[in-house]
Image (spheres, helix red, strand yellow):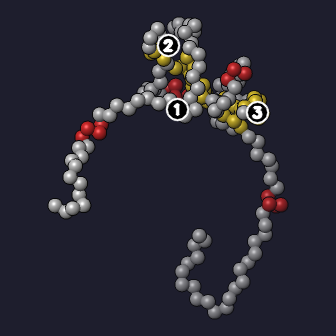
Amino acid sequence: MPAYKSSEYVNESDSEVEDVEFQAPKHFSKISSGSNLDFSDEKEIWLIKAPKGFPIKNLKSLPVSFTATSISNGPETFKAEHNNKKGTYQINEELLSAQSENRKNAVFVRGKKTFKVLKGEVSRFYNIRETILIPEIDIDKVVQPRKDVKKIKNLRMRHFPTGY
């Protein structure tokens, strides 16, 4: 046996059985328990995804367009202050997430000692995203006229100029 090999035996078959402790995501912030909330069968559970630090408490209604076919003709924008900056935002409903058969979302409610999984499923999925206005650009002012390369006489073309 060569001397550079280790005398230790490494068994990789046990690597699948490691106990990994749960760690919360990087920007996770704990909120108070929703034990006073009523989750009856008559109510729906909605999942709203928002940018980090978005003031959900200031959102009084959901300006969602149910007739939108794309983002460009989607719901109206609304103004909100986020991270001490005023911006315009848009809320879109994700229809594919709600119709998918293999949804992997569960709602946990705090019990006396542990968390309980709620029976109901998330019925609607919404995305809040920031919108920006792109200013109009005058192409004639931006584009510089092309300068032709100086032509040299008696050159032989060995390769076809593909352009890149």
Residue marked by disc 1 = 25
Identify residue for label 3: 84
Which is more N-terminal, label 1 or label 2?
A: 1
CB contact under 8 Å: marks 1 and 3: no
Task: Indicate which disc, 3 or 2, sits on the residue closer to the N terminus.
Answer: 3
Secondary structure category for the residue under label 2: strand
Element type where label 1 sits in the image: loop
Q: Is residue 28 above or below residue 119?
A: below
Inter-mark Cα distance, 1 to 3: 24 Å
Can residue 119 be seen here? The reply is: no
At label 3, counting other C-alpha atoms closer than 10 Å, the crowd grade (few under 14, some 14-19, many 20 or more) is few
Residue 87: assigned label: none
Amino acid beneath label 3: Asn
Q: On the rendered structure, is 12 left or right of 67? A: left
Residue 147 % position (x, y): 75, 75
| Above or below, 119 relative to 85 | above
Task: Of the two numbered discs 1 and 3 on the same chain, state the one appearing first in sequence.
Answer: 1
Would residue 70 be visible to someone looking at this image? yes
- Residue 115: image quadrant is top left
Above or below 68: residue 15? below
Total tally of numbered discs in the picture: 3
Q: Considering the image in quadrants, where does the N terminus appear? A: bottom left
Q: Residues within 10 Å of mark 2 (few under 14, many from 20)?
A: few
Residue at image coords 76%, 33%:
84
Labels 2 & 1 near each other (Cβ < 8 A): no
Amino acid at dot 2 = Arg
Q: Please state if 84 lies on the left or on the right of 5 as rendered.
A: right
Q: Which mark is residue 110?
A: 2
Camera-side residue of 53 and 24: 24
Element under label 3? loop
